[in-house]
Image: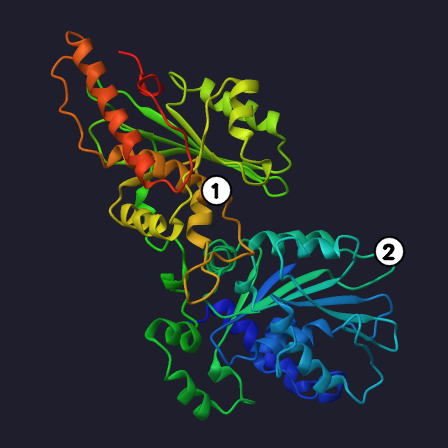
Amino acid sequence: MLTKQLAKSLAESAHRAASESSGSQRWCPHDPTPKQRLFLDLDCLEALYGGAAGGGKSDALLMDALAFADVPGYSALLLRRTYTDLALPGAIMDRSHEWLAGTAAHWTDKDKRWTFPSGATLVFGYLDGPRDHFRYMSSEFQYIGFDEVTQFEERHYTYLFSRLRRTKGVEVPLRQRCATNPGGIGHDWVKRRFIDEPAERQFIPARLDDNPYLDAVEYERSLANLDPITWKQLREGAWIRDTTGLVYHSFRDDSRVDRLPELPPGERWYYVLGCDFGVTDPTAYVELAFTEHSDTVYVTRAEQWKDLHPSGAAEKAKEWQAKLPDEYDAIVGDTGGLGKGYEAEWMHRFYMPMRAAAKGDKLGYIKLLNGDLHHLKVRFLNGFTDDLVKDLRALSWKDEKHKEEHPSQDNHLTDALLYGWREARHWAWEERPEPVADPHNEPNRAHEQRKAAMIRRNERRMEMEDGYGHEADDNDWILGP
């Protein structure tokens, strides 16, 4: 439902549009709808148009990008997620040819650029790879539009603000605009940014009923074939999440806690550090805590760093360890491009024992972790794991086969979680020893129980690993009385 302010603005825009000559839209073959006119008249930095399907989203973006095409020095950029999306028949680049072919605008196919008699330009681009946004590092635009913005990552979207600038004398506003339906890999951040926490941002909702240029009856028949969630997203513009495409679809918001629980006398926390080392990618650490007599694992810290060299990574681990009551009980890591011998180098140079992460049957362990997430057997400490939680909520499968994670999304923190959780889970799912009534009076019994349990855990880990790890002896698992 429209707010009173939005309804008033819509009425004013409709009245203004009715009083203007249709020739004022020089580069557009039709007049904007009232909702599109409201979008075009916005003077804020950032705005979103759409919600439901059929509301004229692509037309609204293209009209908006062309608004200052007669101003010398003006430059606009319109983006789709992939080049395949950009080049689809009827998509926004194809539509620009329908509008501009035969006009005074000139098309350069190599650069995917329209140049107007004024010298203004409209460029079409895409952000297919994780570093494609750097393609525009030296560019300058006064208008940047994202078509189907929920297909993009937030970091790509926010980075493009750095390309939004103008030289002195170019009297046009700086604008970043986007259009989309709910759903997709960016659903959560777009909803948060424009619906839940809009601040100065504007959202113009538009539905099929707002677009008189579309055959609504036939489109309704097409939408009727959708599943209920997708139908509500596309027909009603409902910002509801379809979690079936998420890797960690069982994550629950109520799994977040403010602190670790108090332990009974004689208990202590065991700590595992899961590491995903990157050469060109970020290095990610996730710290997990668990106890002898509980099947709940607590994620206490998670962070990642770019361009972190091996000695810097070791220093980070030491900094984290220094905040614990004792040393890490286990450090597991995927050294990736650093080579298989990196675990030994880590030990000899930095005096911190590390084992190679168990990476076999990743899909199977993702399913098991989803089970623990659903049953609240994995908890996340507020304020220290926020980036990890953000990735868990967003990481999607590459396609409907659910065999590979989406290659354009970060999975470094989630992989570090999986490595650490696998290590902690082996312990947490073991048959647990009976609590010692008074471990201060029975130190030897408490020590032997911990030692035996850790040995059983190692044996089970070695059975399940896929060629990783090393043969352990009893001394590897002596934690002290």
Residue 278 at x, y = what percent?
58, 39
Q: Which residue is mark 2?
A: 168
* Farthest-out residue, left: 437
Q: Earlier in the sequence, mark 2 or mark 1?
A: 2
Q: Residue at x 40, y 46 (%)?
A: 360
Residue 295 at x, y = what percent?
23, 36
Is residue 12 visible to us here?
no
Q: Which residue is mark 1?
A: 413
Q: How many marks?
A: 2
Badge nearest the viewer, 2 or 1:
1
CB contact under 8 Å: marks 2 and 1: no
The quarter of the rendered structure image containing the C terminus is top left
- 428 shown above or below 99: above
The quarter of the rendered structure image containing the N terminus is bottom left
Badge 1 element: helix
Is residue 134 visible to us here?
yes
Disc 1 residue type (three-letter): Leu
Using the image as rendered, state which of residue 185 and residue 110 is in the foreground: 110
* Badge 2: residue crowd in 10 Å (few <14, some 14–19, many ≥20): few
Q: Residue at x 42, y 60 (%)?
A: 403
Using the image as rendered, state which of residue 430 and residue 60 is in the foreground: 430
Residue 321 at x, y = what percent?
45, 21
